[in-house]
Image (cartoon, grey):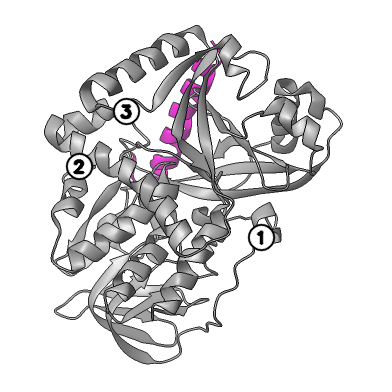
Amino acid sequence: MQRFIPDSYYQASRRVTLAPSSTLDSDVTADVCIVGGGVTGCSAALHLAERGYRVVLLEAGEIGHGASGRSGGQILPGFGTDMSTIERAVGQEAARRLWEMSCESVRLTESLVRRHEIPCDLVWGYVHVAVKRRHVSAMRRHAERMAERYGYHGEHWLDRERLQAHVRAEGYLGGLYDAEGGHLHPLNYTLGLAQAAQRAGAVVHTGTPALRVESGRQPRVVTAAGSVRCAFAVIACNAYLDGLVPALAGRLMKVANYIIATEPLEAATARAILPSNAAVSDANFVLDYYRLSADRRLLYGGEVSYTGQPPRGLDSRMRDKMRSLFPALQNVGIDYRWGGDVGITRNRAPDFGRVDSNIFYAQGYSGHGMTLAGLAGQLLADAIGGQAERFDDFAAIDHRRFPGGERLRVPLLALATTFYRLRDRL
């Protein structure tokens, strides 16, 4: 969601047109009702419709209105937390299965883009850069551990000199290059999934907020002017749950993140700063990330807010950081600035599960949703079809609610983030 500028760069460069949809204004029945039109919901709708299920998808705004259509668009294997956290939660054997599924999620993204001819500018190459010396040793240990414990050899350490082949910015001490990561246009990707779902027979209703979800042998999702009676319901709202399912309250924190987009760069300028067209993020706790768009704009993201209001001096801080990294952009204009809400869990691991035996949910990607959400849609379809083993590997991760209750939860997390922001500067 965005609360201060109506259009993002992604809205201005959308290339996918959906079949006309309307608000739900009657009582209908379906095999599956999905609440939420982001990557999770659209992927679930597609995979279920392809299997012959009658699917109704309800979206409060427009498809991709939330984080799915506003994110940095980076795709990569893994989770929003280190694998050691996953191991402690489920054990080594299950952690290995989860890691392999995270890698599968990247391949699934590529397959969906190719199979449905989604014009989302998919590009391969991702670099995680070290800002501090402690980042260097931590990254190198991480790559060694992933190779030893998980057989993952996709990450390669680049010293400062070799890093120049991918990103030419002062101050970085090196980085991990991952050829299996990359980036895409997130809104066009989400719209492409919705379009494919419509073509497979799913019915999409936009502008239709769900007001409540009633449990029972046949769940019922109620809206302002209608309802959907179904055999199964899927809750795919993530950071936009807003009290719809009380049983999930407190399991997610909504965090706003922001991106600016420059005016289109000259081809030589673009090559001079990001020669390989890889996506980049730094290793700070409150990290910055950036990449080039298909029309050679630098999309630069970072900063956080827990109140929904942009931080003080947001525009100047983001411009200053971008221009400090890339002095060649000193006089380049900023054409767009937007924000979106990310859903994070307390342990930064994804939160999948059931509210009831026939009401499923998937949420809490903690910044890794571009690929994991697509896989979640497939796993939800598998589970509804009776093959829930892989979904249950994710559901086995225990999640605690954020401390502090409704009144203190946000201040406590903001205080913790301030601590880590100060640590980033050391």
Tags 2 and 1 in contact by the CB under 8 Å rule?
no
**Could you tell me which secondary element the residue under label 1 belongs to?**
helix
For numbered disc 2, what is the local secondary structure? Answer: loop
| Residue visible at 27% across and 72% down in the picture | 233
Q: Name the one closer to the observer, 154 or 146.
A: 154
**Closer to viewer: mark 2 or mark 3:** 3
| Disc 2 target residue | 397
* Residue span colored magenta: 404-426
Q: Which residue: 74% across, 26% down? A: 272
Q: Which numbered marker is on residue 11?
A: 1
State yes or no: residue 406 in magenta: yes
The crowding category of the residue bearing disc 3, from other C-alpha atoms within 10 Å (few below 14, some 14 to 19, many at least 20), is few
Identify residue for label 3: 82
Left or right relative to 220: residue 336:
right
Q: Please say if 109 is above or below 22.
A: above
SS under mark 3: loop
Whether residue 21 is situated above or below residue 359 in the rendered picture: below
Relative side of 73 to 5, left or right: left
The image quadrant of residue 15 is bottom right
The label number, if any, that marks residue 404 in the structure image: none
Mark 2 vs mark 3, CA separation in Å: 14 Å
Q: Is residue 38 magenta?
A: no
**Residue 85: image x %, image y %?**
25, 29
Q: Amino acid at mark 2?
A: Ile
In this orientation, which residue lies closer to the viewer: 37 or 249? 37
Question: Tag 1 or tag 2, which sits nearer the N-term?
Answer: 1
Residue 384 place in picture, x, y as percent: 19, 68
Q: Mark 3 and mark 1: span between their CA atoms?
A: 33 Å
In terms of sequence position, does the residue under pointer 3 or pointer 1 come before the other?
Answer: 1
